Image (cartoon, rainbow, N blue to C red):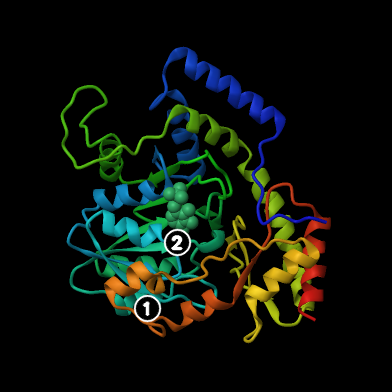
Amino acid sequence: MNIPAAKIFFPDEDRKEILGKIDEILTTGQLTLGKFGKEFENKFAEYVGVKYAVAVNSGTSALEIPLRALDVTGHSVIVPTNTFFATPASVMHAGGKVIFADAKDNLCLDVDSVNESIRKDTKGVIVVHIGGNIQPDMKALREICDDHKLFLLEDAAHAQGSTLDGKKAGSFGDAAAFSFYPTKVMTSGEGGMITTNDENIYKRALVFRDQGKAGFFGNVHTELGYNWRMSEVHAAIGLSQFARLEEFIADRRRAAAIYDKELKNIKKIKSIKISSNVRSNYYKYCALLEKGVDRAALKKELKEKYTVSLSGEVYELPCHLQPIFKENLGFKEGDFPVAEDMCRRHVCLPVFATMTEEQAKYVVSSLKEVLK
Ligand SMILES: *Cc1c(COP(=O)(O)O)cnc(C)c1O
């Protein structure tokens, strides 16, 4: 049985519907910032449970725009070190300074580490819902932010449809950034979405997205914006996938439930715990290998002997050890011990829409053989 690391799924009827919309887009000539983008924003905001959503061309710009709207230039922002490059990079692109914080053994941000990292010039914190698991200490984190007058930005690139106490990812911070990159739980090809309840952030985001222009018509530039627009073709693809989001999550959660149950019977690996009040969308199913297990060798054997591909880690190397940050900001190994250990030892089991029970069970039985 061949198990891919991930799978992009556009059923026949969805492809036909998308093609119909593309035909309409080409016929009307309304190629960008049109009705499909607007519909995508409205539906997404309603789903997340916020007042506003702004569609943009990537998850990276969905991070940078709110950071600009929150005026981070010259200020520091606390970011977990175990995240994707785009999280700290967006702070730097927006003119801010990055302070890294450590993780806990559930891969989530260590709230104590955040508390200890706050400096005089700190303006905010970015929390990343790694693998779709919402930070369970959100309340404590929010309190720290409120006490120190810091903003809280959610990097929800992994967390479309995840909930904490029934509330959706993207509704906890001052603003949130989603990504619709092809590997994410839903895709628009390329694309992203900002969600917020803050009218000021919303209004400025609209301006930043379109070259800092005060309005769509006219040529008055009031902000240092960029071309961060989402095209109508991408919005049409995103709308189609959005309509399947709950279905995709259900498939992923079914596979995850099998992993939860079966991994208990395998030595040398254990599931990374997700709090009972979190509904993860299982963008990733993360599990921790016992110390001493060679991850690269395990992945190689699973692939070559059992045709099971594990998905990419989140992340293999913490950001402070990435050459660009390590050398420029002067970090060394051991600076963030928990994140480093977790990055070194975790694996991500394959999960995707349409995954069957049989496929998930085959992954587990292969894993059992290799770890014997
Ligand atoms: C994918 C991702 C991003 C960037 O999204 P793009 O759409 O690829 O620009 C940002 N943060 C995290 C955590 C991501 O996984």
Position in image of residue 204 (x %, y %): 25, 41
Residue at the spot 51% in from the left edge and 62% down from the top edge: 134
The local crowd at label 2, few if under 14, some if 14 to 19, many if 20 or more residues have their Cα within 10 Å, is some
Point out the tag, 2 or 1, that comes first from the N-terminus: 2
Q: Secondary structure at mark 1?
A: helix
Which mark lies nearer to you, 2 or 1? 2
| Residue lying farthest to the front in this orientation | 304
Closer to us: 31 or 332: 332
Q: Could you tell me how far apart the alpha carbons at marks 2 and 1 are, in whole angstroms? A: 19 Å
| Residue 171 visible in the displayed image | no
Image disc number at residue 223? none
Q: Quadrant of residue 28?
A: top left
Measured along the vertical axis of the image, is residue 344 above or below residue 40? below
Q: Amino acid at mark 2?
A: Phe
Residue where numbered disc 2 is placed: 84
Q: In this figure, which residue is indicated by the disc labeled 1? A: 113
Q: Is residue 55 left or right of residue 215?
A: right
Q: Position of residue 303 (x, y in %)?
A: 73, 64
The residue under the point 23% across, 60% down is 96
Q: Quadrant of the N terminus?
A: bottom right
Q: Is residue 99 visible?
A: yes
Q: Say what secondary structure mark 2 lies in.
A: loop
Horizontal side of 368 relative to 176 (left or right) equals: right
| Total residue callouts | 2
